[in-house]
Image (cartoon, coloured by chain):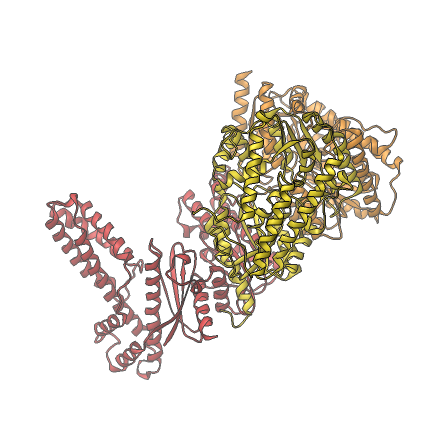
Amino acid sequence: MSEAIKEKSMLLQKDMISRNYEAITSKHETGRKVASTFVPGNLNELLMCFDIVNNLPEINAIQNGMRKVSGNYILEAEKHGHSEDVCTYVKADIGMMGKGNIAPNGKPFPNPDVLLLSYTGCYTFMKWFELLREQYKCPTLMLHVPYEGDGHSTKNMRDYIVKQLKEVVIPGLEQVSGVKFDIDRLRQYLKNSAKAEDGLVWCLEQGKIKPSPIDAYFGGVYYIGPMFTAFRGTPESIVYYEELMKEVQARIDNKLGPVTPDGTPFNDQKYRLVVEGPPNWTNFREFWKMFYDEGAVVVASSYTKVGGMYDLGFRHDPDHPLETLADYCLGCYTNRNLPTRVDILAKYVEEYEADGLLINSIKSCNSFSAGQLMIMKEVEKRTGKPGAFIESDLVDPRYFSAANIKNRLESYFQMIEQKRRGTGKAA
Amino acid sequence: MRCFIGIDLGSTTTKAVVMDENTQLLGRGITNSRSNYDTAAAVSKQEALIDTRLTLFRRGLSAVPEVSGKVDSILADLERNFRHVQFLEQLDDLEQTCVRNVKGPRYVGKETGVNTALAEVFKQLRQSSHALFQPGARRKSDFFRDLAGSDFMQFGEPVARDAGLPFDLLVNVYDKSIIEVENRPPAGDMEGKFLRALEKASGSGDIDSASVVKPVKDALAIPLEETYVVGTGYGRVRLPFPKEHIRSEILCHGLGAHMMYPDTRTVLDIGGQDTKGIQVDPQGIVENFQMNDRCAAGCGRYLGYIADEMNMGLHELGPLAMKSNKTVRINSTCTVFAGAELRDRLALGEKREDILAGLHRSIILRAMSILSRAGGVKDQFTFTGGVAKNEAAVRELRKLIKENYGDVTININPDSIYTGALGGATFAVRAVVN
Amino acid sequence: MSSTAEIMARCQGLFEDLNYSDARAWKAKVPGRKVVGFLPVYVPLEMVHAAGCLPLGIFGGGDQLEVIHGDAYYQSYICRIPRSTIELGVTGRLDFVDGMLFPFVCDVIRNLSGIWKMMFPNVWTKFFDTPQNFDSSIGGTYYVHELQELREGLENLTGRKITDDDLRRSIKLYNENRRLIREVYAFRAREPWRAPTSEVYVIMRAGLMMEVEEHNQILRDYMDAAAREDRPQRDNVRVAIYGSFCEQPPLNLIKSVEMAGCYVVDDDYSLVNRFLTEDVPTDGDPLAALAETYLKHSVETSCKYVPKEEDKGKFHVESVRKSGAEGVIYATPSFCDPALLDRPMIAHRLTEAGIPHINFKYAENSGQMQPIREQAGTFADSLKLWS
């Protein structure tokens, strides 16, 4: 496959990512401390208050998936007693340690100074960091974010998180970093976050336009990059979203669709989809191509909400710094109960005028996947639009069957086409 | 006349259906899928067009009072002779190909001997072919490979022995050549072959008068125009068709079931590789579908493994299971575990028929889940695919449908193998006529 | 005085009954009574009891339930218990259950709580999230509030208040229940031939489907009867089984392990009424007492965070020592994230402690026992050789 064509915002992001990997791998030279943490419930602004560099094992697994090395790492982990049944992010991460722990910049990952176990929306996070802790024997700070089982957060949940931040997380980070916590510094970062969040939300909402100037899934994973990883709260992320907005606006002005990896704008949009579930990373471009080749654009997705549901109105609030972090963690997509997820997806189908909901069910990710068939049924019932179900995995290449997925996608698109033409004169 | 054709390129067989513009079925054809999908599509299409000619003959002859009551035997005669002409033509091709393939180090110095032996074998093959296409003769297969292959082996061995040649020299050249012949697009001139068949048949049996020859020649004179072809099935992307001529097999299956039984609302197809539950609207348009997930547990292939494990033929499983009156509960539809569970049950002293009954039930339970996932079973319900021919599976299905969905009409068509192609042909009509 | 056979007949009947006739009869006996179902692995049963409800353990469908509709909701890579639980629901077997509690086990059970809300909107359904912070002032404060919410939910369901005294009375009964269970476990560890696990297990499962008072009596009777009866001692090895806390193995699997030459002297089957390891204080605020006991005196299991790295697996090692087990069988349901992700860590700790261990996977409807017998038998033989 040829090198993917990149837009300016993508180049900006690429640069941000490589500088962050540089910061991580050079910690021994610079003396900076490194924390590992997760995308949902990512407390980047807080880490910044302690000058701690943020390393995200999920992102490393994605990088390894896209670079097609995750398969070997997974096998390595399975060789050491990890079950074939469990999350492949975890196994790709653990297998990478077994194979020298080399970062994407070719330098070895240093051991983290702290594991910030921000435990939001996914059970496996807890086990993952217990496993890493066993290896690194470093301080581990658990932030338990209760699940919104009844579809909303409660004062008790919020108080519990704030209390953990005050009494566990902040003192722990102070100890690791030697930096005293300064709440005004946090406020400043949160202000940056809110600004960048406005930009992200604006971009994602342009999926409502026809033709859509964005792809809210395959393109979406790039749009959310800085916000969901080590850059929320930084001035660079504000610059990134300003640039991204310009690009999207330019496409709107010229009635263009999103740019596909082969560099052409995808304008011939026949089907508009809402997608639920994470993408597959090992065959990301091939997977995307199956959609745009058939004329399918994704106008909204739930995956772009795993690191925060800003489109529902939440913004980091500098006036209530700790409470806002609590609210942020509680509101991430996978921390919401199933009826709420149905509400959100049905709303997307309607507001983004989609032809239906497509679920990419991920073997690794029970937090997303358990119950998706029910979600599909319910969204179909509410919207009257047909749903479709395909299966793959995050970073396990053994679980990506192109023929199988293609077959289902084609059937689905043709079914939409038939329905659209109406009965009787169908052809 | 305008012909609308649907071709279903499956993993083991390829099927074609020809329709007229009023969606009247004209002909059907089937062939093995081979490694060459283009040829499989061409062969099945030609077979369906041959069948179409026979339909046209029938239509022509039905207007002739003199042959009233004898049309079936006339057509059988004609087809038999046609098949013979076709067979001899393919034999010629095979012989020429064999001769061309007598080369390479193994044959150095033996070319003449091998060629002489080949000539003798083919002479015998031609002679024996008369018996093969005698009235009332039973052929174990209609595929050229099967017919020619076994006779070639039977005649070749003594011929090689008499000529003092190693038999495997002949086998080798045959193996190489049959693949070439099989993968060559079928020869044309179907009408010419029918005329020759007509001549051969004339003067014998029922075909002895102008009252037959004329309507047949008239029917042969009708040009069959391939107005629109739609391809479907697993191999559809390999078909040499423009994209708009390709439809997913789910859509074709739904529409095909609708064509067979217009009141169909739910379709279950259990094939070798997958299981599909499909809901269709009153026009046969798919409203919803579900397939087995990535894990192929409980598909037709599962029965294949069981048959191997029990050292039985696939078609013997159903009848044996029917003898059971105590179903053993089998929990694994996983093909990998099925063998282990089976041996475990046998070791516990369970009877083979009871275990088999359990295995059939477990396949149907799995299908019931897929149906449930696709939105349940609505009246009428049509069951297609290879497993629909298995009586034990059908028995369990009837039971479970009744328990879970009450009284539902269950349609099972003996020709359900053509469902996808039928849907494809209907799509072809709809593409042009509407 | 009942015999073990009589006790087992009663318990086996309850255990096998997928129509829950006993619980139905309990409910019908007094108008207005409510039944509250719960899944593994822990809910404070005393709270449900104090509300005047019957807490009913729902542990999937076992190996006797054919799952048709339940499979329609789950992909092949998800464990079996949520499928069979849905099957129980859609086939009307749980139509008398007024409330359902889904404890924090994993994302699958968590999401099942949402499915239940959508499928059965008339059932009071609650996801019960216990704290993963074990500091009294942090996790304790949170948990007291969660218990209060649970209390209010139950009050809402029944239309009557749960007083602190109601709760204390219930706590006493459940303290008694837990004490008796600990005694049964200790008895089995001492004389496993008198109390085989195939019996103890069924008694524990049945105990989660009946009134606690009856279960307490059964536990006493069973120990009496088992001590009286003469059962032959076999040359079996002593093993502990861990990893089986949520989806339960078929009874045949337990029997197969025993037949293969293993006495099971400790286990983590279904936990629930063994989750708290000490009495809950009956003086002071009962919610605070329940919370504090949960924080300070509960088992280590895969769905609970272990704050200190050095404590991981400590509970297992100590339980092995206490029960006198010679080895551990780590038996997990297929696709069980908590147990399978924990497996390497627990295995490391067991190895460090010099405790031999093996592992295998099962499903609640596993049919083939030959591999289980073979593995357990080989393990038993090797333990004998080592000792």
Whether residue C249 is visible to the viewer of this picture, yes or no, is no
Above or below residue B358? Residue A110 is: above
State the image quarter where residue C252 is shown: top right
* Chain identifier of the red chain: B
* Chain identifier of the orange chain: C
Q: Nearer the viewer, residue C174 or A130?
A: A130
Position of residue B362 measured from the top left corner of the image (x, y, whole percent): 53, 48
State the image quarter where residue B187 is shown: bottom left
Q: Nearer the viewer, residue B125 or C141?
A: C141
Whether residue C104 is visible to the viewer of this picture, yes or no, is yes
Position of residue B111 measured from the top left corner of the image (x, y, whole percent): 12, 49
Above or below residue A285? Residue C349 is: above
Above or below residue A64? Residue A245 is: below
Residue furthest bottom as drawn: B65
- Is residue B338 toward the left or the right of residue A322 in the image? left
Position of residue C57 measured from the top left corner of the image (x, y, whole percent): 72, 40
Residue furthest top as drawn: C387
* Chain identifier of the yellow chain: A
State the image quarter where residue A184 is shown: top right
- Is residue C150 toward the left or the right of residue A354 in the image? right
